[in-house]
């Protein structure tokens, strides 16, 4: 634990070495340790004798700068970055060091060491995302965001333990026949005191607080169990789609987890589709690729969500065992009037058809959009034209009213 200065103004620097893992993997752990010792010596030489220097984690260091304000802290941060431009020699290799530095200042950014360290770390994470190789000073917005994550993260953990999350389902309709193709499971959170929390907000908090895998596992269990309940009520939903995060696909136990859930509920694998994001595809590490192949071999569908909005590589697309592509709603929104949106949608549908993948379009809201998609030989549509996401009971009532779909 770092002993912080007294009541005088001081600054905390959270320092992370960019791409240290590459150095470790390339030169080995022994040389990696030697590199860290060299960095520590360099940081010490750049600091004054009354500064406090500590290693806080694998490749992270903390410096406490007494009797300082924002101006002097920024000046010191610049001197650290400049001082690291001289290469470090390790095992005959000259390595140039790049740092991500987050700065918090007492008392502006917090009343105690724990909050100051937290705010410095948040600033460092922001810096590594937005300004790699530079520094960021903690701001009031950072502090509010950190407090928001702390509050929501705690509430989310409690809600998961108490079963307060639930799934809503949005139907997917076969464009050619009008019959029910499947349903996408979407997480919803209505907190007793915080009210309805938007998925975009609590999913981000879940990722930041390490709860995203728990939500994914719960979603799989809940959605597959719901298929059994619908079957018992006389509604056959051919397949349910569940969104999983990139963290899930790095877990080697994911295929076994899916197999267990299907077996325990006695549901055929083809009735489950797992949606993956482009970040999963971009990673393409060995564990992820092995896991995707294992899930595919179970007979479970694999869908590329929001295709076309990121940095999709067609060469990667052909190497993944996908069964489905989902076109993002942003293209469908402008489909009737935007030639570019029409061109992209036409191209993606053509790619899906040639690769023998089902193409699903999200965000379909008008009959004219549906007619255009039918003319482009699209397979499946999903959107408000058919139904909003709804509770399992409402999904059952909706399907019973759509006799053409349920027959």
Image (cartoon, helix red, strand yellow):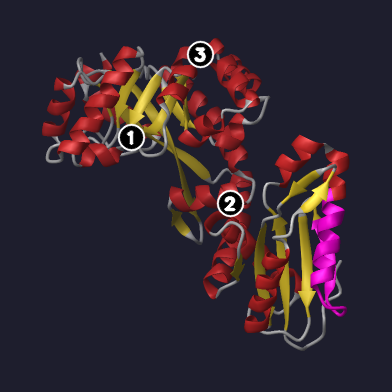
Q: Which mark, residue 48? A: none
| Residue drawn at the location 67% of the way across and 84% of the way down | 69
Does the rendering let one see residue 380?
Answer: no
> How busy is the neighbourhood of tag 3: few (under 14 within 10 Å), some, or many (20 plus)?
many
Residue at mark 1 to residue at mark 2: CA–CA distance: 25 Å
Residue ID for mark 3: 269
Q: Quadrant of the N terminus?
A: bottom right
Magenta-drawn stretch contains 37: yes
Q: Are marks 1 and 2 in contact (CB under 8 Å)?
A: no
Q: Is residue 228 or residue 238 the one in the foreground?
A: 238
- Is residue 380 rendered magenta in the image? no
Q: Nearer the viewer, residue 67 or 147?
A: 67
Point out residue 180 in the picture as x, y percentages from the top left corner: 29, 20
Question: How much space separates mark 3 and mark 1, taking CA atoms?
Answer: 25 Å
Q: Residues within 10 Å of mark 2 (few under 14, many from 20)?
A: many
Residue 389, compared with residue 304, is above or below; it is below
The boundaries of the magenta stretch are: 35-56
**Residue 356 percent location from the top left of the image:** 35, 12
Q: Are marks 3 and 1 in contact (CB under 8 Å)?
A: no
Q: Secondary structure at mark 1?
A: helix
Q: Return the residue nearer the eye: 293 or 318.
A: 318
Q: Is residue 74 above or below residue 18?
A: below
Q: Circle 1 sits on which residue? A: 394
Q: For mark 2, what is the residue?
A: 156
Rendered-image quadrant of the C terminus: top left
Q: In this image, 46 relative to 229: left or right? A: right
């Amino acid at each position: 634990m770092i002993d912080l200065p007294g009541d005088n103004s001081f600054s905390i620097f959270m320092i992370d070495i960019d791409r240290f893992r590459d150095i470790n993997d390339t030169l080995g752990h022994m040389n990696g340790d030697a590199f860290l010792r060299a960095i520590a010596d360099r940081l010490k030489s750049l600091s004054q004798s009354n500064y406090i220097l500590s290693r806080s984690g694998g490749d992270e260091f903390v410096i406490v700068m007494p009797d300082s304000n924002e101006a002097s802290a920024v000046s010191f941060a610049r001197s650290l970055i400049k001082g690291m431009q001289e290469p470090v020699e390790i095992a005959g290799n000259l390595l140039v060091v790049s740092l991500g530095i987050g700065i918090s200042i007492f008392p502006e950014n917090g009343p105690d060491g724990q909050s100051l360290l937290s705010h410095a770390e948040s600033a460092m994470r922001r810096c590594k995302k937005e300004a790699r190789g530079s520094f960021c000073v903690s701001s009031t917005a950072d502090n509010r965001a950190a407090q928001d994550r702390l509050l929501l993260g705690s509430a989310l953990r409690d809600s998961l333990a108490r079963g307060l999350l639930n799934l809503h389902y949005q139907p997917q309709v076969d464009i050619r026949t009008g019959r029910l193709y499947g349903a996408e499971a979407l997480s919803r959170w209505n907190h007793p005191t915080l009210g309805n929390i938007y998925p975009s907000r609590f999913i981000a908090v879940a990722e930041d607080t390490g709860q995203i895998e728990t939500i994914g596992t719960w979603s799989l269990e809940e959605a597959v169990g719901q298929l059994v309940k619908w079957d018992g009520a006389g509604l056959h939903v051919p397949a349910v789609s569940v969104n999983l995060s990139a963290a899930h696909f790095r877990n080697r136990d994911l295929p076994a987890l899916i197999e267990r859930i299907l077996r325990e509920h006695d549901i055929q694998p083809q009735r489950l589709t797992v949606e993956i994001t482009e970040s999963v595809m971009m990673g393409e590490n060995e564990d992820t690729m092995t896991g995707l192949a294992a899930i595919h071999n179970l007979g479970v569908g694999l869908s590329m969500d929001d295709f076309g909005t990121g940095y999709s590589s067609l060469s990667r697309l052909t190497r993944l065992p996908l069964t489905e592509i989902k076109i993002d709603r942003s293209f469908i929104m402008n489909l009737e009037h935007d030639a570019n949106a029409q061109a992209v949608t036409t191209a993606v549908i053509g790619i899906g058809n040639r690769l023998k993948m089902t193409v699903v379009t999200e965000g379909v809201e008008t009959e004219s959009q549906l007619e255009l998609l039918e003319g482009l030989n699209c397979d499946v549509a999903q959107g408000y034209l058919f139904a909003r996401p709804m509770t399992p009971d409402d999904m059952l009532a909706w399907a019973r009213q759509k006799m053409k779909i349920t027959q």
